[in-house]
């Protein structure tokens, strides 16, 4: 009885633990893609500056800060925030979210299927109509020509 | 059933060791499927440990005294809820509970992060499983709760031994707070493994920013809350059950849970500085490491055998393993921190001495100093024996002399810190901010001196409490006034909205207020009164404003003990207050242990606390110890306020919880344009 229960437990645990090794595709832990980027950090810092500014204004209105202190600190935070906004612009934070996702997907595909990517050589042109095609696509998005 | 439980633990150990190896291997080989497999192994290990725990509960409920833990911690005449609570009534079983709670925490972390932090998770899982494997191995090989009792038979062979009854649950533990106190404290000891695991993972994956802090903020807070609740429940138990009139004795076991709580408090404050100003990064990872190690150390002190003797730890087989494990974790942690030191530099230097940053820094230094003074006093007997060959125990006088001033300094900083602005505060701002709190403190000082208080600590403590409380009330009042002016709401609505919308800030203030109330309760102990008397029926004793007249004595048989109860009629300043019935219980199981049930009359002003300490030889006189403990009520009430405040800060906050509808973004864009 005890041996049977133990065996059942071992088998169940074994199946449960080993299943991902056979079901999931090999090697798709893209550490670089997952890690926090400079952009993420800038966005977070922007949030923090906003929060600091709001708290500062609140404390001033509550009468716990002298006017001069408030002006000086506010200017400091604003300069900090402005510098972050500028960096964000340079990072291309303003660009369309879809475009960014599309680029990240393409980069990831290029890493997983290097053969397909090297064949396409970056954002190449369609041999039939000449419009730009995304590497790894099977058909041209404009004319439908098979790539 | 005991073999099944043992087998489950063994299987869990195999699974957790597999996860410990597979998770980093998956990260190294960039194989996500291996990481998933490791996570599943960790979950399966938790399931096995849960099965083992259920098996132990079944054995306890079924009175299977062939199992050593059941025989040690339970007995037939215990009510069912105490039989189940006997899981943590003795050493081996409490280790099983420890392992169970650890595995539950690990599973929650893994399930929460199935799709998040995938880059950090392999390392998080590795740290969690290292922790789990270590305690599982200890549980299985050195303190196995499923061990069967054996006896040597006449022919010299070993054979199974089943005693007729167990030794019973220690009567001192048969009290409601004691039933929940150990699990609550364990949550507190164990929970710090989660922030530790994330901190290490963040360093290893080179992301020492604020991501790990945001992820683990709730874990740190919940753990800190459990640890604090465990401390208070323990104090309440000591006060009501132990019957010596106090609630805190600087016992090594109490100290072992106070230390990680102090470091946790420091950590909760210093992460704010990192979040807001990008400073103190090295300090924070160091505190996390320290917090985890102190949690393990606390478990070790509590669970290394005889609770009251620190000396026992050197003789226990667990001692060496604990020391080796803590040393290994400390070395590995410090190594990782040192390797990433360049990436942990502060974003900016400290602007000014008169800033909130520096107040936070001082608060941290004081918390750590308090922790080390407690550590020093706790370990002194061991150290002195090691160095000089004689064990010297330092008692409450040492701890009080060192920690009361530190506590008062902490109280001062708690009031002063929030009055400073971030970065730099000019004297004119400080004057505005200090006006009300300082006036309140001065008024309180005048009252205290006029009342003729001679104790210097008390004369400092009450004005400081007034200072902090005034600062907090002013914060709420002025905040609500600004809010109601801008939003056009009436004051009460504005106050509620303000608090709910800014949970972290105002929840924190409520916690501070709770601490102030607790300090009031602690300061009350300077005025404690104590009287001892032998009374015969009809005789009276006096203590403070109270008179106690002994009227009756009865004995009665109850489920698992024999109770002797005296009845005392209490009078306050001549008026009849009511009857008090302190009790003495002689338990049949165990070694005939005797406990006292305190009779307590509690009010915000003072507690009347009466202990029935014994019967004279001829049976006609009764030894009564009476105490009057002023203001103790505020200690428990303040703890309740602290819990409420902490829960408020824990509730999910809307991402852009605007204090005011400020055009901050527009202002920033204008500023950016001007700078270009």
Image (cartoon, coloured by chain):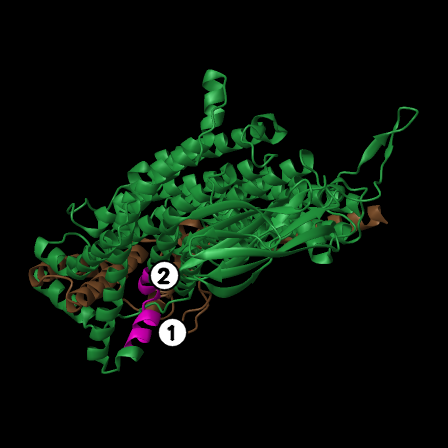
Chain colours: A brown, B green
Q: Is residue A96 above or below residue A82?
A: below
From what the image shows, is residue A104 above or below residue B385? below
The quarter of the rendered structure image containing the C terminus of chain B is bottom left
- Residue located at (46% from left, 51% from top): B543
Residue ID at (48%, 34%): B329
- Estimate the x, y position of residue B488 in percent, counting from the top left: 22, 83
Front in this rendered view, residue B168 or B287:
B168
Looking at this view, name the residue that lies furthest to the top: B388
Q: Is residue B215 magenta?
A: no
Looking at the picture, tell me which residue is in the foreground, B399 or B202. B399
The answer to whether any part of residue B220 appears in the image is no
Q: Residues within 10 Å of mark 2 (few under 14, many from 20)?
A: few
Q: Which residue is mark 1?
A: A142
Residue pointed to by mark 2: A103
Nearer the observer, B530 or B31: B530
Of callouts 2 and 1, which one flags the residue occurring earlier in the amino acid sequence? Answer: 2
């Amino acid at each position: 009885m005890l041996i049977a229960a133990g065996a059942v437990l071992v088998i169940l645990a074994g199946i449960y633990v080993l299943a991902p090794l056979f079901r999931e595709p090999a090697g798709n832990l893209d550490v670089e893609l997952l890690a926090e980027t400079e952009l993420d950090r800038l966005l977070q810092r922007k949030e923090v500056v906003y929060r600091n500014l709001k708290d500062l204004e609140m404390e001033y209105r509550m009468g716990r800060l002298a006017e001069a202190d408030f002006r000086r600190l506010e200017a400091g935070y604003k300069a900090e925030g402005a510098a972050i906004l500028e960096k964000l612009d340079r990072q291309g934070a303003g660009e369309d979210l879809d475009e960014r996702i599309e680029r990240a997907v393409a980069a990831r595909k290029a890493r997983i299927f290097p053969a397909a990517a090297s064949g396409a050589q970056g954002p190449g042109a369609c041999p039939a109509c000449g419009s730009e095609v995304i590497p790894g696509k099977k058909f041209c998005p404009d004319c439908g020509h098979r790539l | 059933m005991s073999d099944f439980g043992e087998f489950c633990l063994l299987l869990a150990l195999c699974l957790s060791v597999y996860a410990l190896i597979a998770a980093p291997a998956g990260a190294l080989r960039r194989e996500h499927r291996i990481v998933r497999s490791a996570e599943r192994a960790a979950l399966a290990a938790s399931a096995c440990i849960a099965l083992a725990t259920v098996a132990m509960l079944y054995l306890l409920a079924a009175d299977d005294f062939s199992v050593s833990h059941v025989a040690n911690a339970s007995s037939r005449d215990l009510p069912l809820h105490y039989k189940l609570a006997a899981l943590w009534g003795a050493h081996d079983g409490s280790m099983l509970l420890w392992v169970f709670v650890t595995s539950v925490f690990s599973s929650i972390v893994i399930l929460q992060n199935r799709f998040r932090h995938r880059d950090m998770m392999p390392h998080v899982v590795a740290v969690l499983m290292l922790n789990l494997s270590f305690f599982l191995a200890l549980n299985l090989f050195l303190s196995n709760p499923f061990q069967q009792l054996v006896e040597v038979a006449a022919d010299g062979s070993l054979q199974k031994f089943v005693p007729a009854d167990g030794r019973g649950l220690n009567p001192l533990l048969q009290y409601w707070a004691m039933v929940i106190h150990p699990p609550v404290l364990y949550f507190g000891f164990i929970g710090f493994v989660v922030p530790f695991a994330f901190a290490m993972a963040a360093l290893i994956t080179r992301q020492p920013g604020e991501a790990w802090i945001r992820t683990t903020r709730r874990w740190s807070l919940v753990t800190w809350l459990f640890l604090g609740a465990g401390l208070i429940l323990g104090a309440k138990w000591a006060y009501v059950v132990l019957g010596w009139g106090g609630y805190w004795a600087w016992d090594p076991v109490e100290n072992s849970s106070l230390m990680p709580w102090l470091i946790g408090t420091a950590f909760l404050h210093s992460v704010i500085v990192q979040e807001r100003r990008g400073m103190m990064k090295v300090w924070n990872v160091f505190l996390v490491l320290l917090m985890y190690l102190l949690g393990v150390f606390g478990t070790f002190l509590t669970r290394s055998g005889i609770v009251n003797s620190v000396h026992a730890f050197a003789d226990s087989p667990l001692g060496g393993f604990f020391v080796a494990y803590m040393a290994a974790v400390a070395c590995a942690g410090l190594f990782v921190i040192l390797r990433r030191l360049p990436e942990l530099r502060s974003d900016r230097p400290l602007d000014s001495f008169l800033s909130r940053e520096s107040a936070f820094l001082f608060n941290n230094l004081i918390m750590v100093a308090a922790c080390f003074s407690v550590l020093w006093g706790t370990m002194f007997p061991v150290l002195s024996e090691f160095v000089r060959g004689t064990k010297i125990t330092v008692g409450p006088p040492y701890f009080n002399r060192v920690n009361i001033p530190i506590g008062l300094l902490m109280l001062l900083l708690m009031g002063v810190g929030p009055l400073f602005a971030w970065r730099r505060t000019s004297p004119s701002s400080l004057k505005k901010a200090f006006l009300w709190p300082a006036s309140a403190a001065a008024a309180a000082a005048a009252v205290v001196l006029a009342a003729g208080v001679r104790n210097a600590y008390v004369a400092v403590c009450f004005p400081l409490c007034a200072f902090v409380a005034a600062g907090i009330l002013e914060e709420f009042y002025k905040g609500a006034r600004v809010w109601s002016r801008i939003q056009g709401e009436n004051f009460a609505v504005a106050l509620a909205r303000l608090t709910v919308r800014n949970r972290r800030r105002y929840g924190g203030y409520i916690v501070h207020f709770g601490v102030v109330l607790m300090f009031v309760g602690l300061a009350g102990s300077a005025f404690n009164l104590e009287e001892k008397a032998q009374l015969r029926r009809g005789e009276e004793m006096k203590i403070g404003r109270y008179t106690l007249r002994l009227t009756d004595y009865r004995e009665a048989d109850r489920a698992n003990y024999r109770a002797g109860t005296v009845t005392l009629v209490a009078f306050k300043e001549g008026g009849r207050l009511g009857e008090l019935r302190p009790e003495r219980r002689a338990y049949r199981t165990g070694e005939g242990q005797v406990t006292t049930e305190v009779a307590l009359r509690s009010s915000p002003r003072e507690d009347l606390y009466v202990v029935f300490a014994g019967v004279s030889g001829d049976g006609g006189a009764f030894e009564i110890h009476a105490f009057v403990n002023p203001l103790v009520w505020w200690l428990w009430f303040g703890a309740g306020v602290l819990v409420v405040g902490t829960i408020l800060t824990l509730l999910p906050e809307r991402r852009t919880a605007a204090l005011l509808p400020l055009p901050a973004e527009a202002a920033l864009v204008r500023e950016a344009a001007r700078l270009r």
